[in-house]
């Protein structure tokens, strides 16, 4: 039986084989196109800067050194930006997860007063928005411009994540809740003690989605922030791309006392600064990416069914 | 006895509402309250001052959009760019589907896994990083120019990013580079839910690979494609501004300014809060109409709505 099935599977025509070859080829090329840029930038940051500035590093690093990364600490503002980025990612993600988990659970409570109305009120926000200028003026009126909370509060309740958790909570057997209720547990107690441990997987999914969103956010800095102490890494990187030549002189001046002996190979150039910062901003994404992969298919499917 | 029970239940309902009230307030503030900002479109608003009855101007800004030949031309350029870029995206909206279909044809699992991992990666980096990568690869000493020069295809470096040629196409390419692998995930999930026995049966009946794709795989994922197509029609005017903002410069501005970016540039660049609110408002209204229309089409064609 198994044998015949195998035979059928391997009965391929010439056309079938041609398709195979072509698909393998196209996918390989596209995958390389997606990955090579990251690799290219990385090998340039650890190669001799005078070579990389001329575009000589294409496939392998040459004269490997790590001074580019060490010298980043001499750029004023970069550390502050990193702190802001990490801060908003940690606090923002925590808040978003709490909101999504709690609301996702509460919207399954049929006893709640006018439950459907509130649920629709939250979900409707997926389908419209006021536009960036009215939003900006609102934020200004609320004194959330040049304010760290301007990064956090508007993103706290996200309808998509609420749907995601609600769908997950609905798949949990009702008996668990009912048993706890008979034992006299209140709503909050049931949520904290029973629901949270069960819905952990979906909360992890939301956390990763939210963290990547917070880390990558750029537009809100652009709109809301004019004080450099609240600039994020993304925003700082954008500025560096546009003004890297003045930047490299800044770095070289800062390090000049120690760089008397340093060669051309490790002197900072516009290219090296730009590329090194790029890699620094990419690294956190690369670190969470494996976890992301495990969860996103699940997450996107639940969202697709409901959304 | 019964009365106290229902009372208790009611009390519980109110209490549960009180628990979610803070979150509902957050939603009201950050999603609904900005809608109030639309009134700026009817006033002559200058940045630091408050609105007053004196500077109420009625529909002046809406009319001013088409009042003079210069402005009509300007609006025409913006609409042309929006339509061109959205149109390209719409015209190639089948790409992720085909990507998923042929990926499914690859039977060598590790290869499949690697391809999926590599091609979804760009989706998780921000547009600033995409721009940074574009800059590193395509600037005058970047990898592309180095290769072209060493192959003798060109003598002088080509300034790809400062070019006003093929802007729509290159922007579409970047969008595709970033999104293709990710958009395919939905289809890959849909394909994996197709009963394997259907393929077996077809093969027993002597169907070739292409016939299997045409008669089994594609019909099984067309509903997903249809829903996503409708959603992209609904979002026809919403290209977002981040991508175009980071890629814009003095050379490509004529071709890259889509509606969202124009609204931003108008308000933040030249303080035209009122007129850009007016444009944003028009855009929002048209988007809601498009969404309802797409939903209507969906009801007509498939007998179900996607909202």
Image (cartoon, coloured by chain):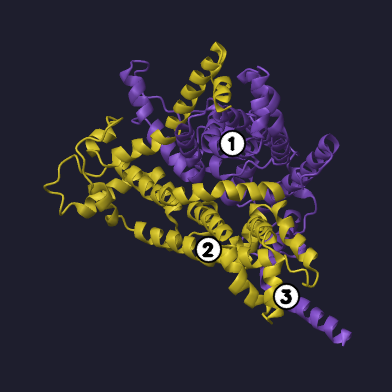
Q: Nearer the viewer, mark 3 or mark 2?
A: 3
Q: Subunit of mark 1?
A: B
Compare marks 3 and 1 and give the one earlier in the sequence. 3
Q: Are marks 3 and 1 in contact (CB under 8 Å)?
A: no
Instruction: Kindly report which numbered mark, 1 or 2, lies closer to the viewer in this rendering.
Output: 1
Q: How many marks?
A: 3
Horizontal placement of B186 versus A249: left or right?
Answer: right
- The front one of A69 and A26 is A26
Q: Residue at x 65, y 64 (%)?
A: B49
Label 2 SS:
helix
Letter of the chain shown purple in the rendering: B
Residue B219: x percent and y percent? 71, 29
Chain A colour is yellow
Q: Provide the residue designation for mark 1.
A: B184
Q: Residue at x 61, y 50 (%)?
A: B267
Q: Quadrant of residue A48?
A: top left
SS at mark 1 in the image: helix
Q: Chain of mark 2?
A: A
The answer to whether residue B195 shows anywhere in this view is yes
Gap between marks 3 and 1, in whole Å? 40 Å
Circles 3 and 1 on the same subunit? yes
Would you call the spot at circle 1 few (<14 residues within 10 Å), some (14-19), or many (20 or more)? many
Chain ID at mark 3: B
- Mark 1–mark 2 distance (CA, rounded to whole Å): 29 Å
Question: Furthest residue to the top?
Answer: A14
Residue B116 at x, y percent in the picture: 50, 37
Residue B186 falls in which quadrant of the image? top right
Q: Characterize the local packing of mark 3: few (<14), some (14-19) or many (20 or more) Cα atoms within 10 angstroms.
A: many
- Identify which residue is drawn at 33% across, 30% down: B141
Q: Which residue is mark 2?
A: A92
Q: Which residue lies under the disc numbered 3?
A: B16
């Amino acid at each position: 039986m198994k044998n015949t099935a195998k035979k059928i599977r391997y009965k391929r025509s010439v056309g079938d084989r041609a398709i195979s070859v072509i698909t393998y080829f196209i996918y390989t090329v596209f995958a390389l196109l997606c990955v090579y840029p990251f690799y290219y930038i990385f090998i340039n940051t650890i190669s001799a800067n005078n070579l990389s500035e001329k575009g000589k590093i294409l496939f392998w690093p040459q004269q490997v050194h790590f001074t580019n990364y060490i010298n980043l600490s001499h750029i004023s503002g970069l550390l502050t930006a990193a702190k802001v980025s990490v801060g908003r990612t940690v606090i923002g993600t925590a808040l978003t997860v709490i909101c999504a988990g709690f609301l996702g659970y509460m919207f399954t409570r049929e006893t709640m007063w006018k439950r459907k109305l509130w649920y629709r009120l939250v979900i409707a926000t997926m389908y419209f928005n006021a536009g960036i200028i009215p939003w900006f003026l609102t934020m200004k009126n609320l004194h959330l411009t040049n304010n760290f909370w301007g990064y956090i509060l508007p993103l706290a309740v996200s309808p998509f994540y609420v749907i995601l958790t609600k769908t997950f909570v609905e798949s949990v057997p009702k008996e668990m809740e009912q048993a706890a209720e008979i034992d006299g547990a209140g709503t909050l107690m049931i949520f904290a003690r029973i629901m949270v441990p069960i819905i952990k997987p979906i909360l992890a999914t939301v956390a990763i989605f939210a963290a990547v969103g917070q880390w990558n956010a750029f537009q809100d800095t652009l709109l809301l922030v004019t004080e450099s102490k609240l600039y994020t890494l993304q925003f700082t990187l954008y500025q560096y791309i546009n003004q890297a030549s003045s930047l490299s002189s800044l770095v070289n001046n800062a390090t000049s006392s120690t760089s008397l002996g340093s060669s051309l190979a490790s002197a900072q150039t516009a290219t090296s600064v730009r590329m090194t910062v790029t890699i620094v901003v990419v690294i956190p994404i690369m670190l969470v990416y494996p976890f992301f992969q495990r969860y996103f298919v699940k997450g996107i499917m639940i969202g697709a069914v409901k959304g | 006895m019964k009365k106290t029970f229902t009372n208790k239940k009611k009390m519980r309902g109110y209490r549960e509402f009180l628990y979610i009230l803070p979150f509902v307030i957050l939603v009201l503030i950050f999603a609904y309250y900005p809608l109030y900002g639309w009134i700026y479109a009817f006033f002559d608003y200058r940045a630091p001052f408050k609105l007053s009855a004196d500077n109420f101007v009625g529909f002046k800004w809406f009319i001013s959009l088409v009042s003079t030949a210069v402005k009509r031309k300007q609006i025409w350029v913006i609409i042309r760019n929006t339509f061109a870029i959205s149109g390209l995206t719409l015209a190639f909206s089948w790409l992720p589907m085909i990507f998923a279909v042929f990926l499914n044809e690859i039977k060598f699992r590790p290869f499949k896994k690697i391809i999926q991992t590599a091609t979804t990666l760009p989706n998780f980096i921000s547009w600033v990083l995409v721009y940074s990568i574009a800059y590193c690869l395509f600037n005058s000493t970047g990898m592309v120019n180095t290769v072209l020069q060493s192959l003798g295809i060109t003598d002088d470096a080509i300034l790809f990013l400062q070019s006003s040629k093929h802007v729509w196409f290159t922007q579409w390419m970047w969008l595709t580079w970033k999104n293709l692998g990710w958009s395919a995930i939905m289809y890959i999930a849909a394909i994996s839910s197709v009963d394997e026995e259907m393929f077996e049966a077809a093969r027993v009946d002597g169907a070739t690979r292409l016939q299997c794709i045409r008669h089994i795989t594609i019909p099984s994922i067309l509903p997903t494609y249809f829903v996503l197509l409708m959603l992209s029609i609904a979002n026809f005017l919403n290209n977002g501004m981040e991508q175009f903002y980071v890629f814009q410069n003095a050379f490509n501005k004529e071709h890259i300014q889509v509606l969202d970016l124009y609204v931003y540039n108008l308000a933040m660049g030249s303080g035209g809060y009122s007129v850009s609110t007016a444009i944003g408002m028009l855009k929002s209204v048209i988007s809601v109409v498009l969404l309802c229309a797409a939903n209507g089409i969906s009801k007509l064609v498939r007998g179900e709505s996607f909202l």
